Image (cartoon, helix red, strand yellow):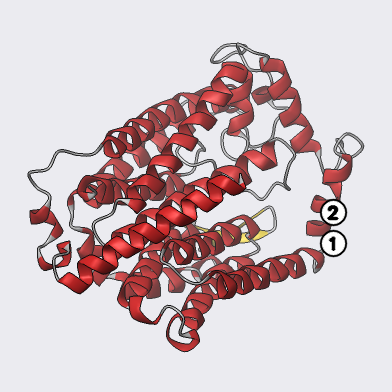
């Protein structure tokens, strides 16, 4: 693992040197609009792999949402297609957003980075507005607009990764300057993660902090100050956890999941049973038992347990392998990006998908506490699906121009 980390660090250094040489010589792609500079070049292998993984994930996600929710909805006297229809609507909207993110020159999104960040941060206050905000399991992190429920922190992820990429690409000559680079990066991470902590949403705070730190690493920020920022973030997270008996109980319950299976670890224990029920080959799509009412939030936070139940160990590893491919080729895209903004953007999005998957699957398998974080492309949740598809579109945008 140390060898792999060293190799990645070396490749990052070489990619940064290549971009710096282009900048100094004036031969880099900044002299020509991206939409024109690569229009005749065929898409890279990374482009096709990322696109294929996302399309398969979205389609499989629709199937699993229907399978995980239909029986429980019927038992409640509702239409079995309630969550599926809503997910299908957001899939259509996500396809439009993904198409725009792929086709529109990413310099356009870069020019909007500051307004997007301001609007997204302001939107984090909406859950506290009476008659608009919704409290779910102790987190004041959702809003209801007519028939739609949305989570502002999801939109903040896109705004933060674009803002971080813009900042780091504009100040490439002063990456060691604590006032011009390190302080703004730390402030961006603190503002984004802090807004989520105020809402009581630890999972989103972790992902947003990881996006900024990952973008800073890819962008060439020195390791020592980056380590200080990371340590400060971890210390803040620890204080947030110990400040609440409820949150602390969730963490301590990990040490005795079986003993707490009727209390703090009920959802995790039921997830274990669903995973065990699937065996190697799975019980078959629609045949899982946990979703019959034993497994809370089977269609959203714990959909990975339903995947393992119905598709078995083979299906679960296939899904994890798909995420590994997505992240791997996302990193390759970052290393081959035609400019520093594209490099940091692709790197930040790759870290986003990696960390969010690890936190969600880790919660389902009892490796980390359950945080309520969705599994990208799979979990029922319109904002999450839309933003994940838009993020994948931005990644494809960079891959389309990488060479």
Which mark is on residue 249? 2
Q: Quick check: 165 above or below 398?
A: below
Mark 2 falls on what kind of element? helix
Q: Classify residue 146 as left or right of residue 97.
A: right
Q: Position of residue 183 (x, y in %)?
A: 51, 83
- Is mark 2 in CB contact (under 8 Å) with mark 1? yes
Mark 1 falls on what kind of element? helix
Q: Quick check: 1 above or below 30?
A: above
Rounded to the nearest angstrom, the CA distance separating label 2 from label 1 is 6 Å
Q: Kindly tell me whether residue 70 is visible in this rendering.
A: no
Q: Position of residue 29 (x, y in %)?
A: 16, 62
Residue at (54, 60) in percent of width and height: 210
Residue at (37, 45) in percent of width and height: 332
Q: Position of residue 13 (x, y in %)?
A: 41, 61
Q: Which residue is mark 1?
A: 245
Quarter holding residue 72: top right
Q: Classify residue 187 as left or right of residue 103.
A: right
The front one of 195 and 145 is 195
The front one of 298 and 30 is 30
């Amino acid at each position: 693992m140390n060898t792999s980390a060293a190799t990645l660090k070396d490749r990052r250094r070489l990619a940064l040197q290549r971009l710096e040489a282009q900048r100094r010589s004036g031969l880099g792609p900044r002299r020509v609009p991206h939409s024109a500079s690569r229009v005749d070049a065929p898409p890279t292998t990374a482009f096709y792999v990322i696109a294929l993984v996302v399309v398969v994930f979205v389609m499989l996600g629709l199937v699993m949402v229907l399978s995980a929710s239909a029986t429980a909805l019927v038992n409640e006297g509702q239409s079995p297609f309630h969550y599926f229809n809503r997910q299908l609507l957001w899939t259509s909207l996500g396809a439009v957003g993904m198409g725009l993110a792929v086709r529109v020159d990413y310099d356009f999104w870069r020019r909007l980075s500051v307004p997007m960040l301001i609007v997204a941060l302001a939107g984090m206050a909406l859950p506290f507005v009476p008659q608009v905000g919704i409290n779910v399991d102790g987190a004041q992190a959702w809003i209801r607009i007519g028939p739609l429920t949305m989570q502002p922190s999801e939109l903040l992820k896109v705004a933060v990764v674009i803002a971080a990429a813009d900042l780091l690409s504009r100040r490439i000559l002063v990456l060691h300057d604590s006032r011009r680079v390190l302080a703004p990066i730390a402030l961006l991470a603190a503002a984004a993660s802090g807004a989520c902590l105020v809402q009581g949403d630890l999972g989103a705070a972790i992902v947003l902090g990881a996006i900024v730190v990952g973008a800073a690493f890819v962008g060439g920020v020195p390791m020592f100050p980056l380590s200080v920022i990371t340590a400060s973030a971890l210390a803040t997270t620890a204080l947030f956890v110990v400040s609440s008996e409820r949150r602390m109980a969730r963490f301590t319950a990990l040490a005795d999941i079986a003993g707490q299976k009727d209390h703090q670890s009920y959802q995790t224990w039921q997830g274990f049973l669903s995973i065990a029920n699937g065996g190697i080959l799975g019980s078959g799509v629609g045949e899982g038992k946990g979703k019959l009412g034993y497994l809370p939030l089977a269609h959203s936070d714990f959909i990975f347990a339903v995947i393992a139940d119905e598709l078995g160990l083979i299906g679960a590893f296939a899904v994890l392998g798909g995420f590994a491919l997505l992240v791997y080729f996302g990193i390759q895209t970052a290393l081959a990006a035609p400019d520093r903004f594209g490099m940091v953007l692709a790197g930040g999005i790759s870290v986003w998908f990696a960390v969010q998957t690890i936190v969600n699957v880790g919660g389902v398998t009892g490796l980390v506490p359950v945080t309520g974080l969705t599994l990208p492309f799979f979990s029922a949740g319109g904002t999450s699906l839309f933003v994940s598809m838009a993020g994948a579109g931005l990644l494809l945008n960079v891959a389309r121009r990488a060479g």
